[in-house]
């Protein structure tokens, strides 16, 4: 029981002051807040940055959880609550400073001083609200194992960082390959011996391996490799330069998200980490919490081995996707914490609902698509639970699930509509569905089976450069009559030709083909097994309530993903792979549920099952990580090579950004700027949406007074890419036509700008 001592304010005083454990806890957090305030002015030192980042991601969240009266044992069993709660506080305090600052005469509120004051005031308010919290709610920091005991897995991200930096310096991929292979070996070995390892060590291994694999991607190049991250960095950099974020963002979905504007700017100004490094280093450190969150959630249902396997499966699906979409990186971790809080029966109702609501709102202002998927999953779960309640002794409606649905829906409606007005809501989707229907498998070939068409989803068949030239010329003549090509653009010598993909030769074709087939089969079996597991969990008669809830969520996810796979309309609205990654928070658990059921008392059966599972998981890890491409040839990801398609597309260099920055200053509003699909990724971080970009860089589609930006692949690789009618086309870059008809106004050896 919490001890109280009477205040020495006089004989008539009736107030009480905390003492004992509560006073020590109060003093520890007050000291941490004072330390943050003292270190922020010194954040130019890298050692101070190393200390400030974890402080910012731990202290505010711990205070919020105590203020909400979240039990300490619930937090210790799901440690991701702490950084996610810190994200809530950072988002809330940063937004408050940004909105209130101009009202009190602070023209640039997104600066270290105002942000520090806002964060400290928010944390002090939370500290005051938690003073009277009973000691039972304290987070048991003292129970954490010694760092020296569990620190060894942290070698993995350091090794991966060294490998990425050596690749950037063109020193070969040996360290990167060793780092990735070590991560895979550690994950497989840990899964095998998981029952004998401490659960804290299992969580640390997942985090370390996740951070290593994510850093192997995010640390490559002058920018984070990826598509969306280029535009996201422009929005972040503008917030840093101007020192303010405005709510109105019509037709600017990225700029409307606080996860790519206010919050990373706040982390930059408070910690001193450069804004680009926030995306390259700090955000992956947050994204690596996703497998830890899945492991902690799965441990409520699965044994240590299969909970670890579920989390590792999510990790291998997420490591090369999360770092490339900053807003999804934050929102997906918040979504995992939202589900965990929704299903956490150890938290009292009022506290649980408050935590769920805050996590739902933070997710809504972080990423619109993640929020839409969450609304769909939770929204489908509500009627499914109501139906199941007629056959099982469960509530018709769970209050926390309803609160999660309402918070996400209300947050999306308010934030995406009247607050930011970025016009990327569900209205356009509903209109398209009403007018065009779901457009089921539009690219299914005549005589093609349904299974084959489903596996290939809505991918259009490839077309040649000649076909593309004919189709795009016809399209421009009909829809873009304002484009005036040069008279000699149609000459035969300027006709488009196919370009060979820059894929290294396959060294062992039979082995490569066999491995690809096995990988495809295993991926589809995993999908089927996850669906079967969801059904088994729902139909199981004698089980805990959380098993039924996870099964219902997974069943909703299966329905949603199947419809998205079949419908071209929904596929155009949101990427299926991204939706799958989010759904894997629960599907990975249902995937391992049947495996745990088969893991019976007989040792021979257990050993056989473990051998098959370990072998299958090894194949998935080796192929997904890119190690198979290194060993067998045929190309690999940007994390392991300085060549190939992924490298040409996503590896951004300093000279390319310099050329893009020069063009952004030279081009005038209204002038047409041409750049192929991936060259545009070099323009986005430097110019945002200020340029009138066109992606068809062909002689007959180039306007006679246009600007043309050529990246490293165009100049040195002599190839260009475009996505036309959902078909990817690779063709020889028309350098001859440009040299003959346009002036080379900028060049630095690897990037060029033409104008006429």
Image (cartoon, rainbow, N blue to C red):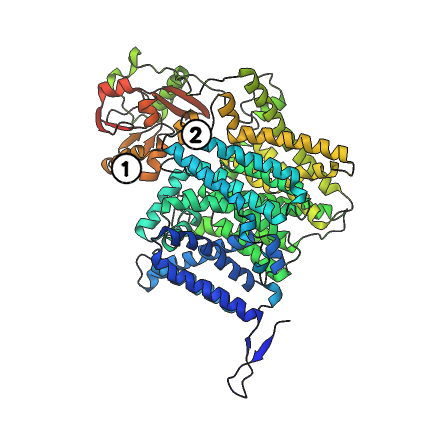
Residue 217 position, x and y percent, is 45, 36
Reading the image, the residue beneath label 2 is 173
Q: Nearer the viewer, residue 451 or 30?
A: 30
* 222 to the left or right of 431: left
| Residue located 44% across and 20% down the image | 504
Say the numbered circle drawn on residue 464: none
Q: Quadrant of residue 579?
A: top right
| Residue located 48% across and 21% down the image | 634
Vertical placement of residue 753 versus 18, above or below: above
Residue 184 position, x and y percent, is 56, 34
- Quadrant in which the C terminus is drawn: top left
Sequence order check: which comes first, mark 2 or mark 1?
2
Residue 23 position, x and y percent, is 54, 71
Reading the image, the residue beneath label 1 is 661
Vertical placement of residue 505 versus 112, above or below: above
| Residue located 55% across and 20% down the image | 512
Q: Residue furthest top?
A: 492
Residue 428 position, x and y percent, is 48, 39
């Amino acid at each position: 029981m919490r001890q109280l001592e009477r205040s020495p304010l006089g004989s008539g005083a009736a107030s009480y002051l905390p003492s004992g454990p509560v006073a020590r806890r109060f003093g520890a957090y007050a000291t941490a807040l004072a330390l943050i305030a003292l270190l922020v002015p010194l954040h130019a030192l890298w050692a101070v940055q190393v200390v400030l980042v974890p402080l910012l991601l731990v202290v505010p969240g711990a205070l919020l959880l105590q203020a909400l009266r979240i039990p300490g044992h619930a937090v210790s069993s799901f440690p991701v609550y702490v950084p996610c709660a810190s994200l809530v506080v950072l988002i809330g305090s940063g937004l408050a400073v940004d909105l209130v600052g101009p009202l009190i005469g602070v023209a640039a509120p997104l600066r270290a001083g105002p942000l520090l004051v806002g964060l400290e005031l928010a944390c002090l308010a939370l500290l005051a609200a938690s003073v009277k919290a009973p000691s039972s709610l304290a987070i048991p920091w003292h129970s954490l194992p010694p760092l020296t005991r569990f620190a060894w897995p942290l070698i993995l991200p350091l090794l991966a960082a060294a490998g990425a930096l050596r690749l950037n310096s063109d020193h070969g991929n040996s360290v990167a390959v060793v780092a990735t292979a070590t991560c895979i070996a550690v994950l497989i070995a840990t899964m095998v011996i998981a029952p004998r390892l401490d659960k804290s060590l299992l969580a640390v291994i997942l985090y370390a391996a996740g951070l290593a694999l994510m850093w192997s991607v995010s640390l490559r190049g002058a920018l984070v490799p990826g598509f969306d991250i280029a535009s996201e960095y422009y929005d972040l950099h503008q917030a840093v330069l101007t020192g303010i974020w405005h709510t109105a963002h019509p037709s600017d979905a990225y700029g409307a998200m606080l996860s790519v504007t206010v919050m990373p700017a706040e982390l930059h100004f408070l910690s001193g980490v450069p804004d680009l490094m926030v995306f390259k280093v700090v955000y992956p450190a947050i994204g690596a919490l996703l497998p830890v969150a899945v492991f902690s959630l799965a441990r409520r249902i699965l044994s240590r081995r299969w909970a670890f396997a579920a989390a590792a499966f999510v990790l291998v699906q997420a490591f090369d996707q999360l770092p490339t979409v900053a807003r999804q990186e934050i929102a997906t971790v918040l979504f995992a914490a939202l589900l965990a809080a929704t299903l956490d029966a150890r938290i009292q109702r009022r506290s649980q609902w408050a935590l769920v609501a805050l996590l739902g709102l933070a997710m809504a202002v972080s990423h619109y698509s993640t929020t839409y998927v969450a609304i769909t999953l939770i929204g489908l779960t509500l009627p499914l639970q109501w139906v199941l309640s007629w056959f099982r002794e469960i509530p018709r409606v769970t209050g926390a699930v309803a609160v999660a649905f309402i918070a996400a829906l209300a947050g999306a409606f308010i934030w995406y509509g009247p607050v930011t007005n970025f016009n990327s809501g569900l209205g356009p989707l509903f209109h398209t569905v009403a007018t065009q229907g779901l457009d089921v498998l539009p690219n299914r070939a005549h005589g093609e089976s349904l299974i084959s068409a489903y596996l290939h989803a809505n991918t259009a068949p490839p077309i040649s450069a000649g076909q593309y030239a004919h189709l795009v010329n016809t399209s421009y003549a009909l829809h873009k009559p304002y484009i005036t090509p040069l008279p000699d653009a149609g000459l035969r010598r300027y006709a488009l030709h196919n370009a060979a993909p820059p894929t290294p030769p396959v060294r062992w074709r039979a082995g490569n083909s066999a491995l690809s087939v096995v990988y495809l089969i295993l991926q589809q079996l995993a999908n089927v097994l996850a669906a079967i597991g969801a059904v088994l969990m729902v139909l199981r008669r004698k089980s805990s309530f959380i098993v039924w809830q996870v099964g219902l969520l997974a069943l909703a996810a299966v329905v949603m993903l199947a419809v998205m796979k079949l419908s071209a309309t929904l596929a155009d609205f949101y990427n299926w792979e991204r939706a799958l990654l989010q759904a894997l928070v629960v599907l990975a658990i249902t995937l391992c549920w049947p495996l745990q059921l088969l893991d019976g008392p007989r040792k021979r059966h257990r050993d056989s099952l473990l051998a098959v599972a370990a072998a299958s998981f090894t194949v998935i890890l080796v192929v997904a990580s890119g190690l198979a491409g290194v060993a067998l040839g045929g190309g690999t990801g940007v994390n392991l090579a300085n060549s190939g398609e992924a490298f040409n597309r996503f590896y951004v260099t300093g000279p390319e950004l310099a050329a893009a920055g020069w063009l952004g200053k030279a081009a005038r509003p209204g002038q047409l700027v041409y750049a192929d699909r991936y060259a545009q990724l070099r323009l986005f971080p430097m110019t945002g949406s200020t340029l009138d970009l066109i992606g068809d860089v062909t002689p007959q589609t180039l306007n006679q007074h246009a600007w043309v930006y050529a990246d490293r692949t165009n100049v040195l690789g002599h190839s260009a890419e475009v996505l036309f009618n959902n078909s990817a086309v690779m063709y020889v870059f028309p350098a001859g036509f440009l040299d003959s008809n346009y002036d080379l106004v900028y060049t630095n050896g690897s990037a060029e700008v033409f104008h006429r």
